[in-house]
Amino acid sequence: MLQVLACGAAVVTLSMGIRHGFGLWLAPVTQDMGWTRQTFALAMAVQNIAWGVFGIFGGMVADRLGAFRVLIAGALLYALGLAGMALSPTPLLFALTSGVLIGAAQAGTTYAVIYGVLGRQVPANRRSWAMGVAAAAGSFGQFLMLPLEGQMIARLGWQPSLLVLAVLVLLIVPLAFGLREPGFRAGGGASHSQSTRGAMAEALRHPSFLLLMTGYFVCGFQVVFIGVHMPSYLKDHNLPAHVASTALALIGLFNVIGTYVSGSLGERLPRRHILAFIYLARTVAIAVFLLAPLSALSVYAFSAVIGMLWLSTVPPTNATVAGIFGVQHLSMLSGFVFFSHQIGSFLGVWLGGYLYDATGSYDVVWYLAMVLGVLAALINLPVREHAINRPSALPA
């Protein structure tokens, strides 16, 4: 179990650490290439949609053939996408590489695939905790990588920095060997008592699954809007560039604590209450941030608070899915929930760019993020967490 947890956490650290830094490239890319913020934001929006779409199918393959093959393919696509992002001369190629390729890569190297392995290898009474550790690793990657990426951009330039990251992400390949599952090593997959189609239909008919998907939509809207657009928001208010990179690093640091605590509490408290609290607390944090005088200190305070809540939705959401439906198709079902997250991400990042170009301000999107946070808190309260009742024999 320790090997699986360590390798899974390291993969998420690399994949999510690189991904969380993309907001640092918005200003240098648009200024150097002469593109609008909406152009960059649209590429990031495509990335999030591609991540969500490919996440469903990547989860199906991981559940059927094991995570190892999916992780290898994801690492290679990630390297190719980062190199293409650096060398793309047009907005279309930029959207295809940084959007489609990296989105597909993230689908194969992040939570849905890793959580499927953890769900099958970790005892049920430790599952929420293990998922919290993996999510905390992704947050540590943000804390570790963001200052590094900021320094690389400043010293090397934005294009060479992306090429360095393209080489670095290939470290996922050796880590994938530590996530090979015994049931898949023979090459013939694992035995399945419930079909993929049956599991999909069962979940999409379950009211609590649909509520979790809706709440996750809001999570994606909020975190991706903040992660991509906050550096430019701070620059617009004449704060130094290092404030933005420090703020995003603080979000990652404090989310290490938040996700671990969230995963641990999920073993003792109703997870629907944890989720409702997180979404409501995000709304309060954003409101205070907008009302307070903007300074480096207020930015750092907001980053610490929002960091505690950043990816802390991930362990209770995925542990609830596993608790309701079991772990046989967990990667696929996590992929469905995450697809909803990515639709929210698409709208958050794209609307941020579109409304900024249209109004010269991010205010409307900040307000929308607050309203959605309240709705998400209310939506999660009716979720029923107990295991679904199935007939003793399921069709194969």
Image: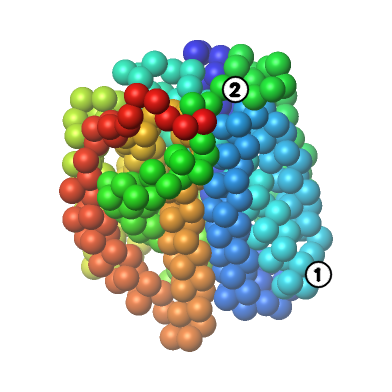
Cα–Cα gap, marks 1 and 2 = 45 Å
* Residue beneath disc 1: 89
Give me the disc on residue 299.
none
Residue 48, given in percent of the width and then of the height, sits at: 55, 57
Number of other residues with Cα within 10 Å of mark 1, as a class: few under 14, some 14 to 19, many 20 or more: few
Q: Picture quarter containing residue 293?
A: bottom left
Nearer the observer, 29 or 315: 315
* Residue beneath disc 2: 190
Residue appearing at x 48%, y 86% in the figure: 358
Nearer the observer, 372 or 212: 212
Q: Picture quarter containing residue 73?
A: top right
Dot 1 or dot 2: first in sequence order is 1
Residue 204, given in percent of the width and then of the height, sits at: 39, 50
| Rendered position, 202 above or below 22 | above
Residue 202, given in percent of the width and then of the height, sits at: 38, 43
Helix, strand or loop status at disc 2:
loop
Helix, strand or loop status at disc 1:
loop
| Rendered position, 330 above or below 224 | above
Nearer the observer, 194 or 220: 194
